[in-house]
Amino acid sequence: APTPMIYKGLAGVPVDYTAVSKVNPDTNSLLYRGYPVQELAASCTFEEVAYLLWHGELPDDAELAAFEERERSLRGLDHDVKRIIDELPLTAHPMDVVRTAVSVIGASDPATPDDSPEANLDKSLRLLAKLPSIVAYDQRRRHDLEFVEPRDDLGFSANFLWQTFGEAAELPVVTAFDVSMILYAEHSFNASTFTARVITSTLADLYSAVVGAIGALKGPLHGGANEAVMHAFEEIGAGEGGAERAVAWLDTALAEKRKIMGFGHRVYKNGDSRVPTMRDSMERMVEHYDRPDLLELYVALEQAMGERKGIKPNLDYPAGPTYHLMGFDTLTFTPLFVASRITGWTAHIMEQAAANALIRPLSVYNGHDERHVPTKD
Ligand code: CMC
């Protein structure tokens, strides 16, 4: 028999249709429901983008007002969720905390088994509203600080920063954060979204699919890269001479055949469409916090990587230092990605559920030939 084709890593294999987003590496564009992500980042709030991803259209004023009111009303955390987070060791990775908290919410929601589109929309909004509380609660408990109650007079991003730092963030910071949420929201059949779709395809509930997606996002080849970028920056050390140290660090890392986090992409081979917008936000934060040394290190590493390998940065490269400047702990960066990507994941979960086929590929066996258990006498 002819040797079957193996599509290792499913690279280049289309597995289904989606109307949620379109990634076009040739034109370096990313559309959410037809809208270029750069336009959404420039003109919309993250809440409008969440609405767009779920409903397929941007909201009008009345729809947005109703959506925001409901989102703001769901931001609190039940006692049980806080109690279970408190029982987790401080050594737990924040992604493990977020994964556990979402699992608790799913286990406690009486609507979990209801897979109607209305129930799934409500669960998605519930998670969107509660993730900032979870992420902020965990960052604060690591610093021995009390939970900050959500504020219903603030938008998603302003409230997220308020709950994390316990003080009102300045407008440029809120804007840069909101842009990052919009850029992280959706990216077609990436590993975590595909995981969510696989789980949904078995007719498991939305929370189970999200918990699985969080697990897939944690790895450094995917969402964990934004955290890993910052670890690299920390190893190099910003400040006087950072640019020279970055080049030396890169040469050593490449000689050791290490992957440089925040660079390269499975789909984009000529640069990630989201990077220029995020880099612009990062530069604003560099100016806001007066940290030109961080930008120097950023530029030097990017340039050297281009010269040595011809590989361009992905979204995680500018996102890492941006979150660092805002004051987030490095380990909290990937949970921030979760708080945004919950919108894309759940849009795909609902799309998968609406036109389901069990996802169950084949494998080509390359183990032992058939053999038999020796008879015992
Ligand atoms: N550092 C060093 N070499 C790299 C990198 C990198 N970041 N990315 C690709 N390469 C090299 C790789 O070693 C390989 O070289 P060779 O052909 O000589 O073996 C070649 O480029 C092709 O790479 P690949 O790993 O086969 O390509 P892939 O499509 O499987 O990988 C990737 C895509 C994202 C896993 C990879 O670029 C990578 O590991 N990047 C670092 C992790 C990262 O930043 N991930 C975030 C991805 S985007 C946003 C997100 O999901 O959060």
Image (cartoon, grey):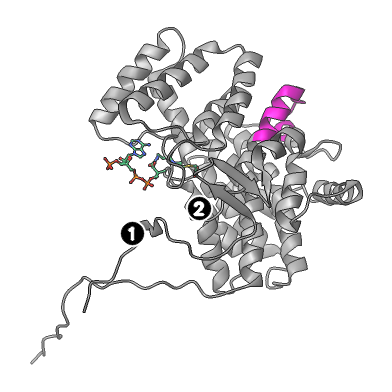
Q: Residue furthest right?
A: 62
Mark 2 secondary-structure assignment: loop
Query: Is residue 203 placed above or below 83 in the rendered structure?
Result: below
Determine if the magenta segment contains residue 56: no
Quarter of the picture containing the N terminus is bottom left
The image shows residue 38 at horizontal and vertical percentages of 66, 36
Mark 1 secondary-structure assignment: helix
Ligand 1 is found in the corner quadrant, namely top left
Determine if the magenta segment contains residue 178: yes
From the Cβ of disc 2, is ligand 1 less than 8 Å away? yes
Viewer-nearest residue: 100 or 231: 231
The kind of residue on which mark 2 rests is: Asn
Residue under label 1: 8
Region of the chain picked out in magenta, as a range: 161-179
Query: Could you tell me which residue is drawn at 64 percent across and 19 percent down?
Result: 284
Q: Magenta: predominant secondary structure element?
A: helix
